[in-house]
Amino acid sequence: MKPATVTRDAPYKREETALLFVDLQTIFCTPGLDPQHPELNAEHYYFKRLKATTVPNAQKLLHAARASGVQVLHTIIEALTKDGRDISLDHRLSNLFVPKGLPEGQPIKELTPIDNEIVLPKSSSGVFNSTNIDYVLKNLGIRYLIISGVVTDQCVDMAVRDASDRGYLVSLPEDACGTYTQARHDNALKAFGGYCWVTDTETVLKRLKELA
């Protein structure tokens, strides 16, 4: 076997780079709306992190990606039907149901997709399991995938691992992600860090600006 000639932190190429937002949608980023955690209020660690860190950094990444001309994709949890008959058993057991067309199921206003940006609804935790994202990314010629979203130790984790297994070089700006405790966030990074380049928003922004 020949050794790999590329590293996980290899420089981006504009035509081969995409930014993927995972589940940064109103229903999961607004206190009281999340069907799994309706008890969490604005003072909970998760929502404080979203407001202070995750969302502002995701916005910076979005602006930089658009300015540099790289692809932007959003994936949201949303059933293909209004009654949810198509969603997975796991999502049924987890009370994780977002009906098709629910306004609160759309990306948060800070990350509102512009015309012609790709939005992929998924009905599983892993975006590669219930969407055609792999097909789409390959059609776009993508090799470098930057991932931002929630929650770090669930849907983000699966996106990172699945993308890596399919041959993408994944960058994870960890301060553009979040989960319910700092410990869960840190443990997730340790667990899947071998599948990606764990970095920070400022480093990714610098690289994106160099492509503009």
Image (spheres, rainbow, N blue to C red):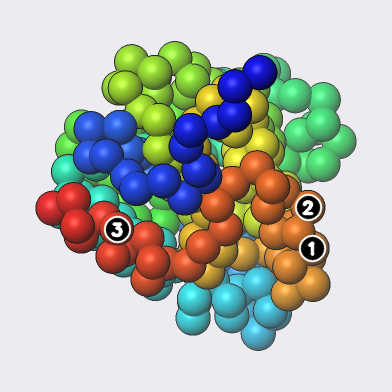
Q: Residue furthest front?
A: 2
Secondary structure of the residue carrying tag 3 is helix
Q: Is there CB contact under 8 Å for labels 1 and 3?
A: no
Residue 138 spot, x, y in % from top left? 39, 18
Mark 1 or mark 3: whose residue is earlier in sequence: 1
Q: CA distance from mark 1 to mark 3?
A: 27 Å
- Find residue 91 and report its image quarter: top right
Q: Residue at x 18, y 50 (%)?
A: 211
The kind of residue on which mark 3 rests is Arg
Residue 192 spot, x, y in % from top left? 72, 48
User: With respect to residue 60, does 197 lie above or below?
Assistant: above
Disc 2 designates what residue? 191
Mark 2 or mark 3: whose residue is earlier in sequence: 2
Residue 95 spot, x, y in % from top left? 78, 42
The kind of residue on which mark 2 rests is Ala
Q: Along the horizontal axis of the image, is 66 left or right of 89?
A: left
Disc 1 designates what residue? 187
User: With respect to residue 132, does 46 lie above or below?
Assistant: below
Q: Which mark is residue 207?
A: 3
Q: Along the horizontal axis of the image, is 4 left or right of 155?
A: left
Q: Residue at x 30, y 22 (%)?
A: 140
Q: Is there CB contact under 8 Å for labels 1 and 2?
A: yes
Residue 59 spot, x, y in % from top left? 34, 64
Assign the N terminus to one quadrant of the image: top right
Q: Residue at x 41, y 46 (%)?
A: 10
Q: Answer whether residue 25 is visible to the viewer in this image.
A: no
The kind of residue on which mark 1 rests is Asn
Secondary structure of the residue carrying tag 2 is helix
